[in-house]
Amino acid sequence: MESMKKIIFPILITLMVLACSKAGESVMTVSGSVKGLKKGVLYLQKVSDSSLFTVDSLEIKGDGSFVFSTPLESPEIFYLYLNKKDNNDINDRITFFGEPGNINIQTTWNAFEAKAVISGSETQKKLEEYRAVMSRFDAKNLELMQASADPKIQEDTEAMDSLQAVNDNNIRRSYLYAVNYALNNKNSDIAPYIALAEIADANIIYLDSIYHSLSPEVAKGTYGKALGSYLEGLRENQ
């Protein structure tokens, strides 16, 4: 009986996915493997109405392979959370840009987030490209913070002012990079996502430029519509 369940379950999942596709819904299938994982629970999660909720979950017993399928009309940020039941929440959640189609995630149980390799999502590639550059701005910011913590520097007003000027310029450059990256990727859902998640406090002129540059398809997506609503709220409060 147990062996029959193992055969029937994947067939039912496949039929459900096909049924959704026939009904005109786009489907995202996330599959992959967590190397070395023998026991734990995997959760597919996303944020909705400012709350993190679980889309689906899977208990792992002896095999780190997993498959999740969910209807999805436009790209969105998802999270793959691993509850290893070790009372340690560090390195247990993978953030990725989900989109309709097949996405594959390969990782290991002891470096779940750090070793994750994600393929199949073009929007995820854009996110990784963006983050690679932004990490350099973040590294510079950390360097400046460490320098300003030096007691000798703190006693030198001119040196502190100089560090502050460099820091302000670094922040300004990071904002301009984010704006330009969004404008240069107007056909990708990464554009409105960056506007909302990375530079929501930027000048409304920049945010408005990003919104009006979006392709019609992106503007109708989850983050495109959210950016439009956000801009409406900003204008009402001006």
Image (tube, rainbow, N blue to C red):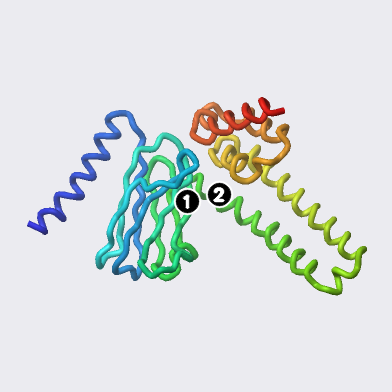
* Quarter-of-image position of residue 232: top right
Where residue 151 sits in the image (x, y, percent)?
A: 83, 73
* Quarter-of-image position of residue 144: bottom right
Classify residue 148 as left or right of residue 105: right
Q: Relative to 195, say whether 111 is above or below.
A: below
Where residue 101 sits in the image (x, y, percent)?
A: 38, 42
Between residues 237 and 35, which one lies in front from this camera angle?
237
Q: Quadrant of the N terminus?
A: bottom left
User: In terms of secondary structure, where does tag 1 sit?
Assistant: strand
Where residue 195 sits in the image (x, y, percent)?
A: 62, 40
Q: How many labels does the image show?
A: 2
Between residues 147 and 189, which one lies in front from this camera angle?
147
Where residue 133 sits in the image (x, y, percent)?
A: 65, 55
Between residues 235 and 99, which one lies in front from this camera angle?
235
Q: Residue at x 70, y 57 (%)?
A: 137
Upstream in sequence: badge 1 or badge 2: 1
Question: Residue flagged by tag 1: what amino acid is it?
Answer: Phe
Q: How far apart are marks 1 and 2 (CA)?
A: 8 Å
Classify residue 192 as left or right of residue 10: right
Residue picked out by circle 1: 96
Determine contact: label 1, label 2, CB under 8 Å: yes
Image mark for residue 169: none
Q: Residue at x 71, y 33 (%)?
A: 204
Label 2: few (<14), some (14–19) or many (≥20) C-alpha neighbours in 10 Å: some
Image mark for residue 127: 2
Q: Quadrant of the C terminus?
A: top right
Question: Residue flagged by tag 2: what amino acid is it?
Answer: Leu
Residue most extreme to the right: 158
Classify residue 5 as left or right of residue 211: left
User: In terms of secondary structure, where does tag 2 sit?
Assistant: helix
